[in-house]
Amino acid sequence: MSMNLRQIEVFHAVYSAGSISAASRFLNVSQPSVSKVVKHTEAQLGFHLFRLVKGRLVATDEAHVLFRDVHDLHRRIGVFQQTARNLKSNADGKIRIGLLPSLAQTVAPEAVARFSLIAPRASFEISTVNHDSFHQMLTSRECDLVIGHHLLQGPDVHDVALGVGRVGVLFRRGTIPEATAIIDDAVLAGHDLIHLTPSVAIGKLVEGAVHLGRPEGKRTIAVNSVVVAAMFARQGLGIAIIDEFTARGVTGPELCFRPITPLVSFELKALHLAGQPLSRVTRAFLEVMRQAIAQPSFASPVDGPGGSPGTSPKRPSLGHASPNPQAMVDARH
């Protein structure tokens, strides 16, 4: 005899909570109704799920076996319910985006501010997401799209190219002469180095481009976050290897950022489910995002301590013309 969804829900609650009373509070129903469902389920199955032992409710061996499968089913039902709620949110016109933390701190606020000028009624839900959670955020419909680099590809997702980012060094002003145009191993060798562990995608990129070993008297500090690396550099603990988008949020009178030589770059993309095409408004927002990504992240090294904007080294091009986001939004009406 099979169990229906209500019986599965009650069994899962009683097994997890350990008592009828606790399960009834969790389910927001009366204790007698929970007891009635449990007894009816046991009668249908032909064996006990719980026994009273010295006044305590104890799960039987059969219940332990069933719970392994029920727990997985209960989790999937929860994902289904969340997906249904998220689809309703999408139908209401909200743009839901998952971003790497480095992009969420600088590029995303800039893009949303710009987009609000041409689409003031657009609403957003922004989540910070790590690479290993991107696919799950899409399949559960918690996000309409995710934005990052080194994204996993697959037949169930489509990607949209947004731009190119560069890796460089962040350091306290005066640590490296302002006129130094090339930041290579020879320059880095004379300083303490704050670098990223291989668990960080940016850290993997620089493994072959930067020699992480230090000469005698110089040290390295390994961290697993670009934001932490930036904070260490702010304290003068060394030169930090980070991406330009993290650097945007911290450069100023005290901190400088320069790209490293040879150039280390990465492509930023937006991923969305293949079966869920992006709306016109979302595509318009991605164009604004593309413009924000292309904004220079650092001044020319000859600009001096004032940090006034100069000519940034040429950013690699994606090789396509940019549509007008205002026209894309207006086309809805």
Image (cartoon, grey):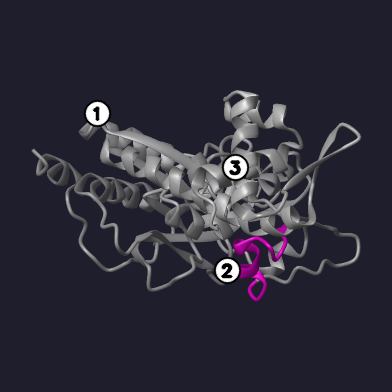
* Residue to which mark 2 is pinned: 261
**Which residue is depicted at the point 57% across and 25% down?**
29
* Left or right of 16, for residue 127: left
Under circle 3, the secondary element is: helix
Cα separation between marks 3 and 1 = 55 Å
Mark closer to the observer (3, 1): 3
Under circle 2, the secondary element is: loop
Cα separation between marks 1 and 2 = 42 Å
Q: Amino acid at mark 2?
A: Thr
Figure quadrant of residue 317: bottom left
**Which residue is depicted at the point 75% across and 39% down?**
235
Tag 2 or tag 1, which sits nearer the N-term? 1
* Left or right of 324, for residue 218: right
Image position, residue 329 (x, y; %): 16, 41
Under circle 1, the secondary element is: loop
Which disc number belongs to residue 120?
A: 1
Q: Amino acid at mark 1?
A: Pro
* Residue to which mark 3 is pinned: 40
Task: Pick the quarter of the image with the C terminus.
Answer: top left
Foreground: 41 or 258?
41
Magenta residues, start to end: 195-209
